[in-house]
Image (cartoon, rainbow, N blue to C red):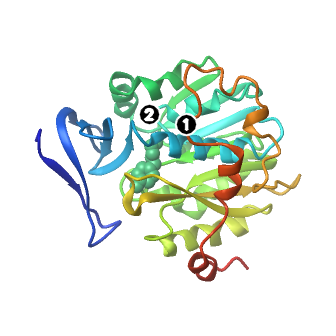
């Protein structure tokens, strides 16, 4: 209710909750897949919540959208074809459109309500859908990728919600195998990879799958998102067998991309220093994750 505080507690983070002060509820409906909530907060702008889990806020979405997009796209010389899994709010599309080398963008989002709600309440993100290179597919990415042509994409970005509910199957081996098959040799995947503070078992499971599924390199990167549980979110960066990809030192630095800032909206978070720094990991994580 307005004026109240909303608590986000969930089996994904037992024993802790995150609260944001609600100024005004703007939208609350059940889609075919989940409950979709939008509210005006006191200090983070508008907030998108799916099944009680914060997906984005206007204040800090830049960190997530910019990092999940530019970590992969700045790691290959000239990305041309990109697939977004999830991402129905349009934020990743907005970031991809900064790359003038990109010619074709497919996006596969299962829940049309997320797209419609973003267009209405988050125009700063939904602007991504206006790019003529974008081809929208409303449906299950598991099916979409099963039928994707082999070696079709230079990059795949999995901008998913947590693996509880609609996104449950997006952390399983068969799905990663279809992604690997859909990427060209030396193609790259950037996959949302939860919190190093909360989910090291899940991260380990994903890395174990990716190390056998992607014969190139597998790296873990992370960034700060204050409204996500534990205040950080990670990304799994994988490359298929083929031309070596150095994820840590961007071969295609965003600063050299003319047009990256031509947008009326400048980059707020990502830059090449943040790119490299994102791969520096705390000792507990290096010790916990078996890279071998
Ligand atoms: N496209 C908005 C972000 C979706 N990904 C998030 C990562 C993990 C969070 N617990 C919830 C959403």
Picture layout, residue 24 above or below residue 15: above
**Residue at 69%, 63% in the rendered image:** 219
Residue 46 location (% of width, % of height): 31, 34
**Residue at 76%, 24% in the rendered image:** 258
Is residue 280 found left or right of 239 in the rendered image? left
Is residue 287 found left or right of 197 in the rendered image? right
Within-10-Å neighbours for mark 1: few <14, some 14–19, many 20+: few
* Numbered disc in front, either 1 or 2: 1
**Is label 1 in a helix, a strand or a loop?**
loop
Seen from the viewer's position, the closer of residues 35 and 37 is 37
Is residue 197 found left or right of 36 in the rendered image? right
Picture layout, residue 177 above or below residue 119: below
The answer to whether residue 58 shows anywhere in this view is yes
**Is label 2 in a helix, a strand or a loop?**
loop
Q: Which residue is mark 1?
A: 268
In the picture, which quadrant includes the N terminus? top left
Is residue 187 found left or right of 138 in the rendered image? right
Q: Contact, CB < 8 Å: mark 1 with mark 2?
A: no
Residue most toward the bottom? 287
In the image, which disc is placed on residue 165? Answer: none
Within-10-Å neighbours for mark 2: few <14, some 14–19, many 20+: many
Residue 169 location (% of width, % of height): 48, 57
Label 1 to label 2: alpha-carbon separation = 18 Å
In the image, which disc is placed on residue 89? Answer: 2
The answer to whether residue 161 shows anywhere in this view is no
Residue 83 location (% of width, % of height): 63, 38
- Tell me where residue 287 sits by quadrant: bottom right
**Residue at 43%, 43% in the rendered image:** 60
Q: From the Cβ of disc 2, is ligand 1 less than 8 Å away? A: yes
Picture layout, residue 127 above or below residue 201: above
**Residue at 36%, 54% in the rendered image:** 165
């Amino acid at each position: 209710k307005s004026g109240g505080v909303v608590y986000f507690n969930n089996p994904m983070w037992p024993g802790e909750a995150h609260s944001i002060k609600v100024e005004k509820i703007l939208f609350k409906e059940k889609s075919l897949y989940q409950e979709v909530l939008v509210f005006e907060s006191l200090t983070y702008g508008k907030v998108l919540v799916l099944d009680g889990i914060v997906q984005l806020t206007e204040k800090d979405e830049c960190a997530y959208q910019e990092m999940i997009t530019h970590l992969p796209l700045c790691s290959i010389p000239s990305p041309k074809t990109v697939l977004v899994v999830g991402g129905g709010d349009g934020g990743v599309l907005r970031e991809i459109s900064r790359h003038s080398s990109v010619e074709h963008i497919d996006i596969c989002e299962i829940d049309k309500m997320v797209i419609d709600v973003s267009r209405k309440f988050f125009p700063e993100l939904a602007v991504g859908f206006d790019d003529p290179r974008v081809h929208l597919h409303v449906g299950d990415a598991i099916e979409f990728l099963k039928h994707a042509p082999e070696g079709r994409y230079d990059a795949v970005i999995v901008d998913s919600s947590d693996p509880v509910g609609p996104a449950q199957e997006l952390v399983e081996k068969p799905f990663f195998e279809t992604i690997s098959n859909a990427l060209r040799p030396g193609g790259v995947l950037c996959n949302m990879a939860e919190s190093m503070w909360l989910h090291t078992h899940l991260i380990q499971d994903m890395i174990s799958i990716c190390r056998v599924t992607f014969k190139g390199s597998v790296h873990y990167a992370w960034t700060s998102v204050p409204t996500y549980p534990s205040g950080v979110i990670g990304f799994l960066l994988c490359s298929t067998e083929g031309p070596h990809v150095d994820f840590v030192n961007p071969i295609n630095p965003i600063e050299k991309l003319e047009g990256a800032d031509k947008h009326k909206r400048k980059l707020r978070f990502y830059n090449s220093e943040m790119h490299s720094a994102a791969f520096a990991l705390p000792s507990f994580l290096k010790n916990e994750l078996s890279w071998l």
